[in-house]
Image: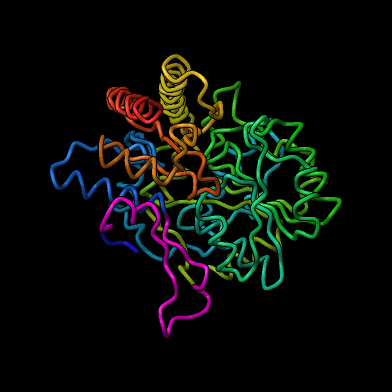
Amino acid sequence: MRGCVASPRQAILSRMSPQPGLSPNLQHLETSATIAISQEAKRRKAAGEDVIDLGAGEPDFATPSIPADAGVRAIREGKTHYPANEGILELRAAAAKHLSLLSGGRPVNADNIVVSNGSKQSLFNVCFALFGPGDVVAIPAPAWVSYPQIVHLSRARPVLVPGEPEWSLKVSVRDLDRVVPGARGLILCSPCNPTGAVYTHAEIKAIAQWARDRKVWVIADEIYRRIHYGTGPAPSFLDLPDEMLERVVVIYGVSKAYAMTGWRIGLALAPGALAKAMAALQSHTTTGANHPAQVAAAAALGDDRVEQDVSRMVAEFRKRRDVVVGRFRQELPGVEFVEPLGAFYFFFRVNSFGGIGGAEFCTRLITTTGVALVPGAAFGDDRYVRLSYAASLDNLQKALDRIIGFAKKLSD
């Protein structure tokens, strides 16, 4: 799964099936399309090709100096031993205060926060602790590639719920009731990967009420919450009163807004009993997250000066978003796309270009122009393609020249 991909089509469509002798736990496991495409782009670059990778879902900025320096100091001060299973108190306290301030000062209990090796492990811990055979977990689609895989690994059954094109591919309570009437869980990402759509406060409240009435667990992936192009952070489940949060787990972390993907620090804020269960589970898997990285994350979330770096990066993402949207509207009028209000993704429809799907579009695009994008099939809808504008404005403009030119030729 971690080696070089043999061909662009294999990079896009690769699928792992269990080999003889392997556990049936892996019967649904697929390779990550986003990682495979990133590896394919790196392979081509290493071979001397002119490649622009707009497939990666990580900021192109350096980690701000304050958390970076804190991590270095932690190593030099000998903070290199096993941390507590649930995470060091310094980080959990900083995260609790940070999340409280983002939601108007609401109380957040640091004891209910579990720190993991990236938000992906936080998601796995939650699903493994909550779900099992026979459980149905609803996932609004298009959806991040790992959600269904993580649910499968917990032996539960993921059910993709298609979003409405007229509603930025988001789902409503009516959609959830119609498609998954007996769901035990719901994984909701806002701001959304891959679309950049953002659920409003009213939409989140309606979904929370739906889940409460039906005793459905909500896993709210809010890793992109700070990358929001409206006023303040994106709306959150933490903006709701406590009585609506009894079965809600909020996933957060420093990877995206703080440009710390490689530090691998994720957080889960959960009801007390569930938080303890996840910490116990983690004690038998990874023990705890990287100790110096936790110190760095505490500085990122706890030092007000770092917010200046976040604001600067979000402003740059907004500028890039405006360039992408503007060029598509001007040079490819009529092409459907989701208006991105958060995160750093642009999700556009390609099946109007000669009737091809996203996988073929991406294969031919990287082969003929050297631009790497992710096909919508990876997220549950192959009519679309995901572009990440977490790239320099210069590279973004060059890539857009190639994408637009390629699309126009397909339409001729």
- Name the residue: 45% across, 23% down: 321
Name the image quarter holding residue 17.
Answer: bottom left
Outermost residue, top side: 330
Q: Is 16 contained in the magenta span?
A: yes
Nearer the observer, 283 or 172: 172
- Name the residue: 59% across, 49% down: 251
Is 360 placed left or right of 271 in the picture?
left
Quadrant occupied by the C terminus: top left
Name the image quarter holding residue 164.
Answer: top right
Position in image of residue 123 (x %, y %): 56, 57
- Name the residue: 54% across, 30% down: 342
Q: Which residues are magenta?
A: 5-32
Position in image of residue 69 (x %, y %): 32, 40
Name the image quarter holding residue 281.
Answer: bottom right
Is 142 placed left or right of 131 in the picture?
left
Q: Is 61 contained in the magenta span?
A: no
Is 38 placed left or right of 43 in the picture?
right
